[in-house]
Image (cartoon, rainbow, N blue to C red):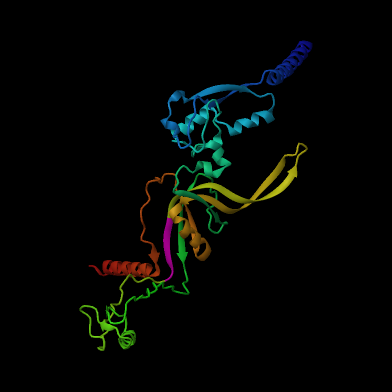
Amino acid sequence: MTVNRTLLIIGVIIAIIGAGLVFVGNLYLSPPTDFIVAARDNIPAGTRLSDLPEDAFVQIPVKFTNSSARMMLEGVAQPQDLQAMRAAGAILIQDVYKYQPLTLGSVVSPDNPAAARVTRLGLDDPGLVVITIPGDDTNVPEGIQPGDRIDLAVAVTDVNDILVLKEEEEGTTLTALPGSTLTGIPNEALAAVLAEAGYVVEPPEGAAPINSKETPTPEPTPEGPVLREPITKLLVQGAQVIAVRRDTSLASVSSDGSASIIEGDITGLDVVIPREAFEFVTMAMNGGNLQIALLSPLVAESSEAPTLGASLQDLLDLFIADRETLTEEADAP
């Protein structure tokens, strides 16, 4: 009984080893078949894949005898890639010629697998840009991941200088001959000089005589909302995080040359924002206090709306309003 059991165990081990050898042998002698897609005819740049007929591409079987050769699949579209990019409304940014494989670098789509390595290939909206926001554990929520959505707000706590831009007054150029009549002379001194030179100077129609003194018109005092520092404004809503930057250090290098990297603390985020908000976000990063809020996955992308912002005056108004309301309720019989 013991002998038979031993023989059985040995037989099972030999079978497993044999099956493994057969699998490895088939892998090298008969590698698996992969498929890539190629264009049936010339397709110009700017074409949306969803506008093409289903048979615009053909599947081509390919086999690779080693793993290094199979790495070329990372640069070309496979049938499942084409299907996903077509559904996402991908657009060609390069001409694709007849019988040429469809490379991932020629397609812009958020579902392009190459967008994880080449960020610009995922920007299918020309109104969007990618910006790197420096950050650490003081302003970046813990556990944030690529694919999350965030709000960006700026807080201004101190304004030292107020910059007022005034348009320069345009100079007046006069071209006339002595004896001719000039109207609309800008000031009395110039009018007197021109009169001595033989010009006939007249004030513009409806204006006071040259020698008379004009009564200055009082300028109205501009009225506007009272803003007390600090102030806060939401700049971007629902921005997508596409990468989380971290400190890295080399732990070790294996015999085959592959490196083991250890990731450390967060140093920044790569975020997709509207191009029109780029200047404001840049100003907030350099001259203000940029804050990041992590959104719930349940927040709809289309829920963006203008915000009023907040100032110290708003806080004071809220404080007073709440006190009055609570005081009235407490005094009520």
Would you say the magenta stretch is mainly helix, strand or loop?
strand
Q: Quadrant of the C terminus?
A: bottom left
Q: Residue at x 23, y 85 (%)?
A: 209
Let me know if residue 297 is in the magenta part. no
75, above or below 299, in the image? above
Residue visible at 53% across and 22% down? 59
Of residues 94 and 79, the one nearer the viewer is: 94
Q: Residue 163, position in %: x, y?
A: 44, 73
Residue at image position (43%, 31%) is 50
The residue depicted at 54 percent of the width and 44 percent of the height is 119
Q: Where is residue 181 in the image (x, y as percent from the top left)?
A: 26, 80
124, above or below 211, in the image: above
Return the residue nearer the eye: 312 or 44: 44
Q: Give the range drawn in magenta.
A: 229-235
Image-based side of 306 in relation to 140, left or right = left
Task: Specify the quadrant that holds the N terminus.
Answer: top right
98 and 150: which is toward the camera: 98
Q: Please say whether residue 232 is one of the residues in the magenta stretch.
A: yes
Count of numbered marks: 0
- Residue 237, image x, y percentages: 42, 52
